[in-house]
Image (tube, rainbow, N blue to C red):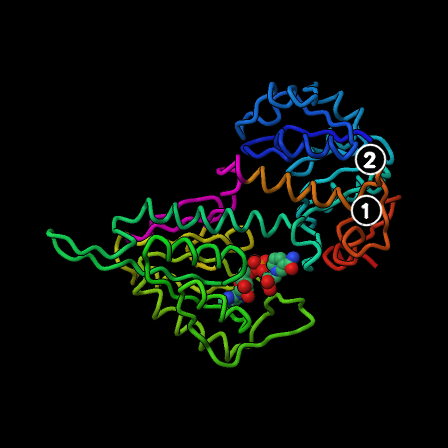
Amino acid sequence: MIAGILKEYGTEKRVAMLPCEAGNLKKMGVDVIVENQAGQNAYAFDEEYSSLGIIPSPRKDVISKATILLSVNPVPVDDLESCHEGQVLCSSLDPPENRLWLERAREKGLTVLALDLIPRISRAQSMDILSSMATVSGYKAVIHAASLLPRFFPMFMSASGTIKPSRVLVLGAGVAGLQAIAIARKLGAVVEVFDVRSAVKDEVKSLGGKFIEVEGAKEDAAAGGYAVEQSEDFRKKQQELIQKRARVADVIIATAQIPGKKAPLLIHKETVAGMKPGSVIIDLAASSGGNCEITENGKTVMFKGTVVIGKSDYPSEMSDDASRMFGNNILNLLKILIDKNGNLALNMQDEIINGTTAVHAKAYVSKRIKQMLNIK
Ligand code: NAD
């Protein structure tokens, strides 16, 4: 089997596999080729791949030769047309955004492994790109906020006077939120946290954050550990409390999301207007609508002295380590996809493989993809 690592398009700086992980894939008996300059924006140059026997080649050669194509983002439609029946594409997908792309891949008889569909079960933790990339985002969001804030994060007692610590409000204590809490605490800020899942209360506390509980949150065991939409009554209570805490915060890191739904609106325009001038809001839920009324996805907006950043591409900005984590996630997935001779062996009875396969043999496979795209 041949695995082909493709160069990304547009502003994306990550690469699906850095030389080290690609070398480890070779050790598993897989031939690996890489597109020319695929890793350069992640500081991995062709010579490094070559030194491991991974030959940099033109894109068309990688596409025509590879059994499985590895990329961070789905390949452009033109490349899809060049792919041949039975070929496997492995990348993140965002199915609702790429519905037509996926339908074309299905018609052509391609197999699509959607890394963002990997089931969130313990056995799949090492393959979970949503978690690894959320870890990067949570970290980078706090560092970015600290660099923009015209105030210190930690408390200072000096001859020039005492500086109070900054207050950071974290909305949503999932993977990104927990990472944000940990980093903000390490930088010395006072951290307050809201979430609708009571299960995260102890995790927040153990990281040094203060969990602000709003009674009456709806939880659903069938949601697989994810949040569900809340009642109108709960929303009102939660909103009142959040607006109060937001007004005294220097930084808000907003990460609250509900899978498949618009992100909950948690910070009103009036609240932003009431924040201390110079405050910073980083909205990591921007691509699904944002937690703040002012947020514009991919933009920085200055509103009454507070800067509101809607951002979803922090992993690309930390291309080296983000690519390392992404490549390791793929490597761990491939370990269950290939046999001891290095050949592809897709066992659709395996919960992880079945859950991650969007289309195969001209059919939609994953139960989640069928739900997401409303396919019977
Ligand atoms: P996410 O990105 O879907 O949401 C982020 C957080 O926002 C969640 O904690 C959610 O509860 C919270 N939220 C939603 N609505 C809210 C509201 N109105 N107010 C406040 N907070 C709100 O979450 P995620 O980071 O993807 O993690 C979600 C779940 O997946 C967690 O239970 C986590 O433990 C689990 N998980 C499992 C694995 C695994 O086992 N492989 C890996 C990663 C995450």
Q: Is residue 112 above or below residue 1?
A: below
Q: Secondary structure at mark 2?
A: loop
Which corner quadrant of the image does residue 224 belong to? bottom right
At x 38%, y 62%, the residue is: 169
Asked if residue 262 shows in the view, the reply is no
In this view of the protein, which residue sits in the foreground, 63 or 23? 23
Image quarter where the C terminus lies is bottom right
Check disc 1 and give the amino acid type: Val
At x 31%, y 58%, the residue is: 250
Which residue, given by chain and number where applicable, does mark 1 sit on?
359
Which residue, given by chain and number where applicable, does mark 2 sit on?
342
Magenta stretch: residue 299 in it?
yes
Other-residue count near label 2 (Cα within 10 Å), few / some / many at <14 / 14–19 / ≥20: some
Q: Is residue 294 above or below residue 224?
A: above
Which corner quadrant of the image does residue 28 belong to? top right
Asked if residue 275 shows in the view, the reply is yes
